[in-house]
Amino acid sequence: MELIWLGLSCFRIRGREAAILTDPFPKTGGLSMGRPAADIVTVSCAHPDHSYVGGVSGSPLVIWGPGEYESAGILITGIATNSAKGRGKDGKNTAYVIELEGMRVCHLGRLAQVPSAEQAETMSNVDLLLVPIGGQGGLDAATAAETVSLLEPRMIVPMHYAMPGSDLKLDGVDRFLREMGASPSELQPRLTVTHATLPAESEIVLLDHTAPRKTPK
């Protein structure tokens, strides 16, 4: 499985059978996801920075909301959560557990509160956790660290935080690293992982959203 960060909460997850895109966003705050192709798109909430499906090329299956889904041998479970400071439709968030190639990937979307015991049970045994850390409607550094401690993933990839080239008012990654007791590491252009190469101890991976991208065919 290959994971590439396109910015904010948008990742392209490439498996053997399909490509999944999470939370597509329009050009905003100096960021652009380009025009990626995907077979499946997951949308966590109605906020424009998480739901720009029109920016995805191809004719993907769009998954928006809680439930159980299957496509191309990939199992996806949507878990209803809340997005703080939002009301009505915009106040609802869906976290997704994506099962592919023997691994469980959890994308928390615009989650703004530490998961409840019931929600955490559904997200249990996660190998890779994609977690917002920058605040401003999503988890901040402290609540993100608490969520990581609750879910105990094998690998943690922070998302939705301040990066060079963006003027969005988000916290930087340093606060989260301090909460986790971790040191800054070199940004990686992509993450390639299999079940056999998962680390024995929990590990934080920082991805570079500006790395060159290749659109999957």
Image (spheres, grey):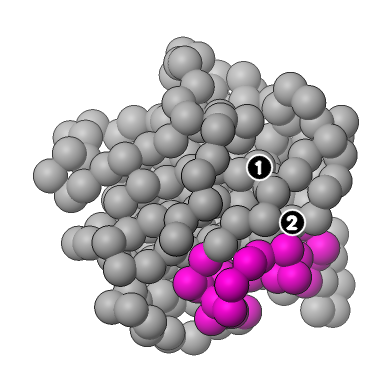
12 or 105, nearer to the observer: 12
Looking at the image, can residue 135 be seen? no
Identify the disc placed on residue 74.
Answer: none
Count of number-bearing discs: 2
- Asked if 109 appears above or below 39 in the picture, the reply is above
Residue at the front extreme, as displayed = 217
State if disc 1 and disc 2 touch (CB < 8 Å). Answer: yes
Residue 60 pos. (x, y %)? 55, 77
Q: Amino acid at mark 2?
A: Phe
Residue 50 pos. (x, y %)? 72, 61
Residue visible at 21% across and 40% down?
198
Residue at the left extreme, as displayed = 196
Q: Which residue is mark 2?
A: 25
Looking at the image, can residue 64 be seen? yes
Q: Earlier in the sequence, mark 2 or mark 1?
A: 1
Which secondary structure, mark 2? loop
The Cα–Cα distance between marks 2 and 1, rounded to whole angstroms, is 9 Å
- The region drawn magenta spans 38-64
Residue visible at 86% across and 39% down?
29
- Asked if 191 appears above or below 216 in the picture, the reply is above
Classify mark 1: residues with Cα within 10 Å, few (<14), some (14-19) or many (20+).
many
Residue visible at 85% across and 46% down?
28
Q: Is residue 202 left or right of residue 29?
A: left
Classify mark 2: residues with Cα within 10 Å, few (<14), some (14-19) or many (20+).
many
Q: Is residue 125 left or right of residue 19?
A: left
Q: Amino acid at mark 1?
A: Gly
157 or 215, nearer to the observer: 215
Q: Which residue is mark 1?
A: 7
Which secondary structure, mark 1? strand
- Which quadrant holds the C terminus? bottom left
Q: Is residue 172 left or right of residue 30?
A: left
